[in-house]
Image: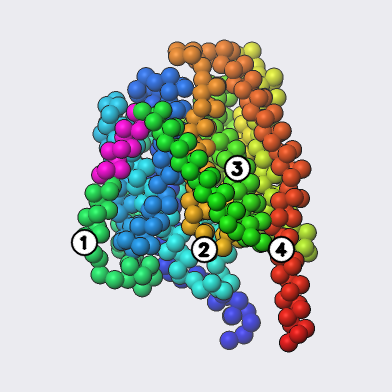
Amino acid sequence: MDIAEQNNEIRKHPKGFYVIAFIEIWERFGYGGLHTVLALFLTKNLGMTDAQSFSVYGTFVALVFAFMSVGGYIGDKVLGTQRTIILGAVTLMVGYFIMGLANSDITLIYAALAIVAVGNGLFKANPSSLLSKLYSKDDPRIDGAFTIYYMAINLGFLISMIAIPYLGARYGATFGFYVCGGGVFFAIASFLASRKLVKGFDSPVGLEPIKYKNLLMVAVGIIITVTVSTFMLQNIKVVRFLLLLVGITVVGIFFRVIFKSSGTERNQLIAAFILILEAIVFYTLSQQMPMSLNFFAIRNVEHAILGIPVGNPQSFQALNPFFIMLLSPILAWMYTYFGKQGRDLSIATKFAVGMVCCSFSFLILSFGAKFANAQGIVSANWLVANYFFSSLGELLISGLGLAMVAKLVSQRIVGFVMGSWFLSISAAGIIGGWVASLTAAPKGITDPLQTLPVYSNVFLEIGAVAGIIALLMLITAPKIKHLIEKEEVVVGDSVAEDSQGA
């Protein structure tokens, strides 16, 4: 086999990779559709105020991320990765179909959202876990596999963010939810039909015959969790209190782990803790896309891009996955290119630049509002610029977040810190709902001339606060880099000394 053939072989991926990527596309299609239209659905179909819908949406997102680590544990230790994927997908499908059936029954809608949150928690961590099992740790194809996989996730989002708002506007919101459920059904059917391509790849418990006692235990857990989550969605203050309690507990444990550590581990845990706090700020602001930014697009932005009509203004949200897919390979190339030259930015600096982008994205909208026409309508170009910079910020922070945890934390406590990362996103959902409520117009007020100054002022304040935080992050980035690399230099020297002694 010559070099060209060898390189071609390296680029090939196992057939199981495409099975996993395909089910992820359609699962994200379902979740992305609900994510895109939920806040507006709550105001139109249930008569909620903007602030109420933002609070419910934020709580829903908090529950989605809070349950993720539980799903990963069930896949690893209780049912197996593949069985948990199927169970999570079935749970999601049921939730979407109930959303379609609920119409204006608020209790049923809360129950459906709770089911989707639990289903997402069961599902989300397991396809990537299964994907990692297809490759050995030193397989040169693995980075490319996860890059394509991340793009597949955003492809599912892109399709649904265009299709579901259009279908909902044309045939009714409930029809859009049925389509979300249908997408997940398609994912389940394709996975079952192609399951032989991932045969033998699973967690240890998944390779054993199913234990029906475990399955029953998980089923009972799902029922209990859905019941409790339904209650929480109707009693948001309880969720805030519990999240605060859990947050204080996790921070306490985090500090305990830090104080019991030493050397490299302590320094890197401190760095990880700081970066997680920074991520909470970013996620809080990125949650504005389906909330305040969505409502701003509906009320105060022209519904056309470069003269091309946008069928439904909620579909502006599709700009986010579009820019993610566009920018991902560019950033991946830049990391590699500058990394080889030793000039790649540190993870802390990348986080800081990401926050700069986030700040700039909101300041752009506030500035663009000054050029609104006499009817209070702003050019869509300003919103496109907003999504470009916020998506770039997302890639620099969210896209690197889990890699940061994996790099800085020892295997002994990586599970705890991963859980802390997802908890930070969960907390950002609640806080993001509150921030979005600051833009909420009084019920019944939809006149663009009245809503424009509200959005403009709040976006200016958000951008200014994010800018101050970004400046602090830039100032502290060298210190965080020093914490991360301080002991690595010592370790490198000791290795060199050992080599000389040998």
**Residue 170, quarter of the rendered image:** top left
Q: Which residue is mark 4?
A: 487
Q: Which residue is mark 3?
A: 277
Quarter of the image where the N terminus is located: bottom right
Binning the other alpha carbons within 10 Å of mark 4 as few (below 14), some (14 to 19) or many (20 upward) gives some
Q: Nearer the viewer, mark 4 or mark 1?
A: 4
Q: Which residue is mark 2?
A: 412
Q: Name the residue rendered at 40%, 47% in the picture.
A: 67
In the picture, measured across the screen, residue 28 lies left or right of residue 260, that is left
Disc 4 to disc 1: CB gap under 8 Å: no
Q: Earlier in the sequence, mark 2 or mark 4?
A: 2
Q: CA gap, disc 2 to disc 1? A: 31 Å
Q: Earlier in the sequence, mark 1 or mark 3?
A: 1
Q: Position of residue 51 (x, y in %)?
A: 47, 22
Q: Nearer the viewer, mark 2 or mark 1?
A: 2
Between 487 and 193, the residue placed more toward the observer is: 487
Q: Nearer the viewer, mark 3 or mark 4?
A: 4
Q: Earlier in the sequence, mark 4 or mark 1?
A: 1
Residue range in magenta is: 223-234
In the picture, measured across the screen, residue 189 lies left or right of residue 240, that is left
Q: Earlier in the sequence, mark 2 or mark 3?
A: 3
Q: Position of residue 149 (x, y in %)?
A: 50, 58
